[in-house]
Image (tube, grey):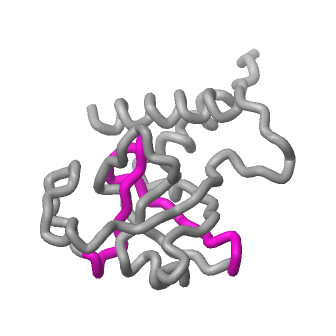
Amino acid sequence: MRICLFWLFWMLTVVAVQGQTAPADIEPFSGTASYYAKKFQGRRTANGEIFRQDSLTAAHKSLPLGTIVKVTNRNNGKWIIVRINDRMSPRSRHLIDLSRRGARELDFIQAGHAPVSLEIIPTLPVAEALQQLEADSVPVPPQP
């Protein structure tokens, strides 16, 4: 059941992204990243975990909790892999909020924010669903 729901969400996301037109030099998942304030250390995240500044986790407005994302600092090319485990305010002007460790590894602690691009890393259920979709879309020649 979870795989079916995740597959459905993934397909809707693919259709929505394909329907968008963006300038060639702007990626669909581009924006600014910031990082959590120290006061959030030890508080519960949206998925119920305790937030830790030394973890590689992040908050996003709409990506499903548990999504694995590659975050690349567009200023210096450094990248990290994080897991979405929290939600941001819908009014936030940032694309993603990282833990302090994530900001340190992307080298934007002093600036407080940085331009980033996001790439969703398919997990095993997503990869299997995409393979099945590709297999289903290949026409089978008629049998004589």
Q: Residue at x 61, y 63 (%)?
A: 116
- Where is residue 113? Give x, y as percent: 53, 68
Closest to the observer, 31 or 83: 31
- Where is residue 42? Give x, y as percent: 13, 69
The image quarter containing residue 72 is: bottom right
Q: Residue 94 colored magenta?
A: no
Closest to the observer, 108 or 30: 108
Residue stretch in magenta: 53-76
114 in relation to 8, above or below: below
79 in relation to 27, above or below: below
Q: Residue at x 33, y 53 (%)?
A: 66
Q: Residue at x 46, y 84 (%)?
A: 104
Closest to the observer, 9 or 43: 43
Q: Residue 60 colored magenta?
A: yes
- Where is residue 124? Give x, y as percent: 42, 55
Closest to the observer, 8 or 69: 69
**Quarter of the figure with the C terminus:** top right
Left or right: residue 79 versus residue 103 is right
55 in relation to 58, above or below: below
- Where is residue 4? Give x, y as percent: 36, 31
Residue at far right of view? 24
The image quarter containing residue 1 is: top left
The image quarter containing residue 115 is: bottom right
Left or right: residue 110 versus residue 141 is left
Q: Residue at x 48, y 40 (%)?
A: 129
